[in-house]
Image (cartoon, coloured by chain):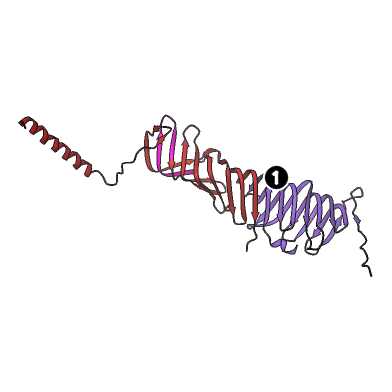
Amino acid sequence: LPEDREKPVHIVSDQAVLDDAKGTVTYTGNVKLTQGTLEINADKVVLHVVNNELTKAFAYGKPAHYQQLPSPNQPLTHAYGLTLEYDLTAETVTAIEQAKLTQNQDTFTGERITYDITKRTVNAFSAQGSSGKRVEMILQPKKKATP
Amino acid sequence: MSLKNRVILILAFVLIGIALLRYDLREPDQPVLSLEVLDGEKADSYATDITTDRFDQNGQLASSVFSPRVDHFQSKGVSLLQMPDIRTWSKDGEWHTTAKNGRYYDADEHIELENNVVIDRQPPQNPITMATEWLRIDSHLEQASTDRPVVITAPDGIAEATGMTADWASNRVTLLSQVRATYEKAR
């Protein structure tokens, strides 16, 4: 939801390391990050804090999973990837490696997928070179409004 | 009453008078403090307003421990510290730790702190405050650790966990289990 970005970010995990030199906090073991309706589940999440403000979260898993309610009357948007980058400033989520995103009934897969939370737009990218995974989109036909 | 008894009585009164006089003239700022007892054994000595400094191999001040009252138990090789106030320095800055009680072990020079233990990491490092009920400090290893619940507050949020190690040499704090954290946007 649009107001999610104003909500506090909550995290639970098994362990954590606060590394002042790098300006990061690394959470490991059954990590769950929530912010309003936004939720990320991963094996490991690395938070980047700049000037005492949380700017980015990198989630790693097999796969890491993101979900969020785009608006009250729409189904959850889901994203999966071996790496998920949640940019709190740009308000984007980027799935990297074995990337997949489902929005309404549509499904996108590729090497890298960037989802703009505010605009609800999807940009999908294939891997470099010919052998890489190509972008695939499965768009479900919208049901016609019955007259 | 015979003369002899009368003389003895007078002498007794004189002695009591002198004793009372000496007690009365005792230094007013010399409080008669009882020695602490540990496991049924009384301390061998105590000292007040004690500061103990430790320097690293380069001659830099590495840690400074102050306590308004320390009781030492020779046979146990233990000292009980009241209101210990500990400052430790690493290459990145200072950590300041206070508690209600402390126990220093001569053998391996570690300190155990108890009750209202608060550790403050000072600027220029990112300031954080850690609160727990028990903490072990190994100054020569530049480390502190606890297996108890700990609450960490920072300008951007708060975290709770069970068990923690702090390493001032690498400036890392590791939360060992049951980690729960909340980050708020600066208003």
Q: Chain of mark 1?
A: A
Q: Residue furthest bottom?
A: A147
Q: Residue A121 at what x, y percent from top left?
A: 83, 62
Asked if residue B78 lies in the magenta stretch, the reply is yes
The residue drawn where x is 22% and y is 44% is: B24
Magenta stretch prevailing secondary structure? strand
Frontmost residue, B30 versus B53: B30
> What kind of element bears circle 1?
strand
Residue B169: x and y in percent read 58, 43
Q: Which residue in the rendered view is the most extreme toward the left?
A: B3
Residue at which label 1 appears: A28
Whole-percent x, y for residue B47 in the image: 37, 40
**Left/right of residue B13 with respect to residue A97 in the rendered view:** left
- On the question of residue A134 being in view, the answer is yes
Magenta span covers which residues?
A: B56-80
How crowded pointer 1 is (Cα within 10 Å; few <14, some 14-19, many 20+) is rated as many
Between B159 and B92, the one lying in front of the other is: B159
Chain A appears what colour?
purple
Identify the colour of chain B in the image: red
